[in-house]
Amino acid sequence: MSAVTVEAAGADSANQAPVRRGKGRRWSSFILPTYTWVVIVYLSLPIFVMIVFGFNDVPGRVSAKWYGFTTQWYRDLFDNVELTAAFKTSIAIAIVSSLLATLIGALLGLALGRYRFKGSGSTNYLVFLAIASPEIVLGTSLLTMFVNAYTFIPQGFLTILISHIMFSISFVAVTVRARVQGLSSSYEEAAQDLGANPTTTFRLVTMPLIMPSVISGFLLAFALSVDDFVITSFVSGPTVTFPLYVYGAVKSGIPPQVNVMGTILFAVGVLAAISSAVAPALSAKKDARRLAQDRATTEAHYSSIGK
Amino acid sequence: MADQGKPSLEDLVESSVTALGGGVAPQRLASRRKRLVPYGLAAPSVFWLLVFFLIPTIYMGFISLGSGYLGDIKFGLNFSNYVDVLKTYDTQFIRSVVYALIVTFLALCIAYPLAYWIALYGGRRKNVFILLILLPFFVSFVIRTVQWQFILADNGIIFGPLKNLGLLSENFHVLSTPIAVIAGITYNFLPFTALPLYVALERLDPRLLEAGRDLYANKVTTFLKVVWPLSLPGVFAAFLLTFVPAVGDYVNSQVLGGPKTTMIGQIIQNLFQVNFDYPHGAALSFILMAFLLIGASLYAKVLGTEAVTSAAGR
Amino acid sequence: MTGRRNTDPAWLRGMTMRRMSRRDLFKAGGVGAGALSLGAILAACGGGGDSSAGTSSGAIDWSAKPAGTLDFANWPLYIDKEKVDGQLVRPSLLQFTDQNDIEVNYREVIQGNATFFGKIQPQLAAGKSTGYDLMVITNGETLTRLLALDYVVELPTDMRPNFDKYAAPSVKDPAYDPGNKFTMAWQSGLTGIAWDPKQIAELRPDNPTITSMNDLFDPVFAGKVGMFGDNADMPNLTLLGMGIDPTTSTVDDWNAAAEKLTAQRDDGIVRQYYEQNYINALSNGDVAIAMGWSGDIFQTNLSGDSEGLQFTVPTEGAIIWTDNMMIPKGAAHPVDAMTYMDYVYDPDVAGQMAQWINYITPVPDSKAFVMGLYQDTGDEYYKNVAESPLVYPTPEDQAKLHTYRVLTEDEQLEWNGIFQPIYQS
């Protein structure tokens, strides 16, 4: 009993030590974890297949038969002109759209999370609608707007860019908003008390505090943009992006380079996610170490004085 | 647990000034500029969303009442388009709803234990598990669907060996059946189901579970009486965020499906991009949008408007 | 204007001497010479530049010199490719560039008629350039619509001596474009039945040969039949299979065909409705018999993706369709396009293309070039191509071939309403 109360009193949710007792132990320490791993493997199955078959020595298009191991597709990665062009287009659109979407979406997230203002309710609702709308509705409505003579925009790179920014804004805003809501405003108040003006406060206090979520939002927007198929298929006009190319190639046969490119995108995503998760922990360790050093120096100083 | 009640900076300034008995007018002047700050921050995004989300949706509403084909669309008030479209495609519509319900139910069943274990027992490695779940979704969903087509091929890496061993008949196939489509859609939407559940379960105060056990409830009762009711907002959010997009999916049924698995998303895509029949396509699209609006309002009514906006929070 | 220098058969033959197998070709992934130029990138960005020889509003000056660039949109696997010195090239395009100083930006961007139309329609409707000077569209609903909406440039009749001299009678003055005012045939193909002899023999040992349309409806093949999911091949071929000539069929005939097709689907005979991907399904065994196109079987057997697949013209007859070259309105380099369009009707050039593409060439006289390749190399392959009725059909063969029904806008609506629900169930 006492152990439990101590635990309950001293822990916050992130570091809550799991409580195990009695019969429940079988579930919590065996069945459920196993189940979790099974699901994770199930979710990753197509990825494994993609990575493995990027090394398949096929004579033509992707095939289920294993012909042998080769790294040829990694060497001849850009042999297929149309595929390469599509890949480059996807990356370009993703970079530009996620930068812009992160910029204005983070500001929106800050506004929604920190301030209460007239229209914040409707804005929140608008953001929710944009996230929850079926992609096909978003895509078709954008299409009808772009083909209209009055609001005509030639379909292609620009229209895809516009559409990607549109759906990314909501995701970035929501990510940043969640973080901002969890922050107390006492940091900013302390800065203001110490004489900082609003701009400096924003630059030196607010921004670093919300930066992790901004980066998460950016990564999310980037992944969404590279991945987007439905909306892009409606507004792309003659431009071909990577997912569009793959979908078209389903009918005529998929070049093996597709598996390789998918593997590369996946690896980049993994690295980005890991580094964004590890970096704050690393810098926290660095700060803790420096703090300990400072303390040691101070103590040494005082004790030497005391002597 | 309400996180909307955070006092803003201006509120604090205002209240402290009032407490000091100072006049209101000069402070009003000073805080007016501060009051504009959120509007300034939000303006670019809201503008973008209005112009490229709200307006196109409204415009599509107009087109849905029109007639004609791409290149020659005439505006009108043909509400009959909606009737036509529901009558002609009723089978596909019902099928899409049924599939989406099955998918959502399956996804909830799969994701709930997952979210439960990670949120309550994941400990320090919670984020790692969430990352592992999200990792596959760094790869384009078209590629993942195509990989499933590859994996589930009649004589592919799963069924080929099974057939060679005689465990399955030669004619057995999963592709081109509703099972493949439902499995594909469930797979694609699993994170949309898992994340809201996880967020809701993670917010649970573990001390409530302790309290339950202290009061002699066993695990099952604790779950039914404590965990489940508190996670309901997450369940509803997961339902909404899975069901609505699932109804409109078309890639899975296109790639993995066969005759008699056509979903309404395919019909819409076909109307727009093969028949160029924009008015009828827009009508169908708008009906899908209506699903979302009805679902969101129901959700808001049942759980309060706050729940709607935080439902999307991940 | 065309062919300032005579085509050099020896040069072309030389290019094809080191003919590599289709296997190697697919392995290498298909690099094309001069494909990723600035022009192509601009086209990809969805807006071509202003035209030089004419605009969509103004008349085209056909007597102007070619601009030196040609933006050509085509279907995949539809032009000759060879490996020369380790590099993948398109010999017929190279020679064209050589002779006429015109760079060709060859883009294999057409995956379907309707989808391609959807991509270029907005520009055409707004009077802007599509980014392409030349495109290839099959006869049917899309082509009829392009002509009806006036999205295609009318061709000058005095700039195609090769066409006038060498084009087969069947592609001259077609029903869908009388007088070839707007189009010139690229290649033709047959829609018939493609099948896997091994699987058929297993499923129906007492009658292992496919001869008739009714084989597609045979219950013994339940779950192993593939049909096209479209409004052109499927209905027309089914009508033909019922002994009805599509070009004179009535609405009652259409309804009868639809009934037959619906029964076929509801009885579980059809595994799936395909587009171009029927060939994958056939190769990997998902289906044993399917509606198919003549050239695909050639190509897939050669590439090693499958073995021994057969293509049959049903006894009731097969459909012949034609992919046509045309110049979209607003094309920036129409004179270059016209130069190319006539260039491909030179018999040697046509032969060079025919030996690779393996569809029905519009230039019967090109047979001599292909036989010449056989004599030079002794490779049986060339002989097979030259003697194949799927590349060079004889008059008797042609008697069994029928074209699509040409439909007016209203008829098309009714036709679609009858047949689309079958595969969109």
Image (spheres, rainbow, N blue to C red):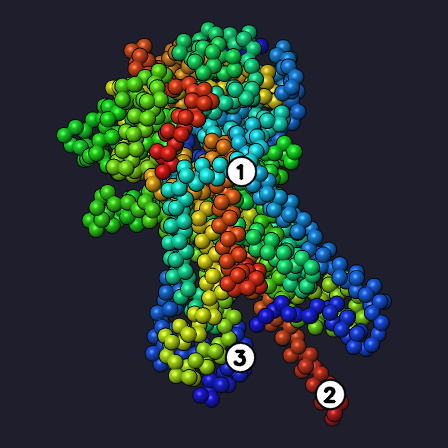
Towards the viewer: C224 or C365: C224
Mark 3 chain = A
For the question of whether residue A157 can be seen, the reply is no
Callout 3–callout 2 Cβ contact below 8 Å: no
**What residue is at 54 percent from the left and 8 percent from the top?**
C157
Q: Is residue C200 above or below residue A71?
A: above
Position in image of residue A208 (x %, y %): 67, 64
Q: Is residue C190 left or right of residue A259?
A: left
Mark 1 chain = B
> Which quadrant of the rendered structure holds the C terminus of chain B?
bottom right
Towards the viewer: A228 or B13: B13
Position in image of residue A170 (x %, y %): 59, 54
Q: Residues within 10 Å of mark 3 (few under 14, many from 20)?
A: few
Quadrant for residue C298, please give it.
Answer: top left
| Residue where numbered disc 3 is placed | A11
**What residue is at 53 percent from the left and 60 percent from the top?**
B300
Callout 1–callout 2 Cβ contact below 8 Å: no
Say yes or no: labels 3 and 1 on the same chain. Answer: no
**What residue is at 56 percent from the left and 19 percent from the top?**
C150
| Residue where numbered disc 2 is placed | A302
Position in image of residue A207 (x %, y %): 69, 62
Position in image of residue A139 (x %, y %): 54, 42
Q: Which mark is residue B64?
A: 1
Instruction: Name the residue type under label 2.
Output: Tyr
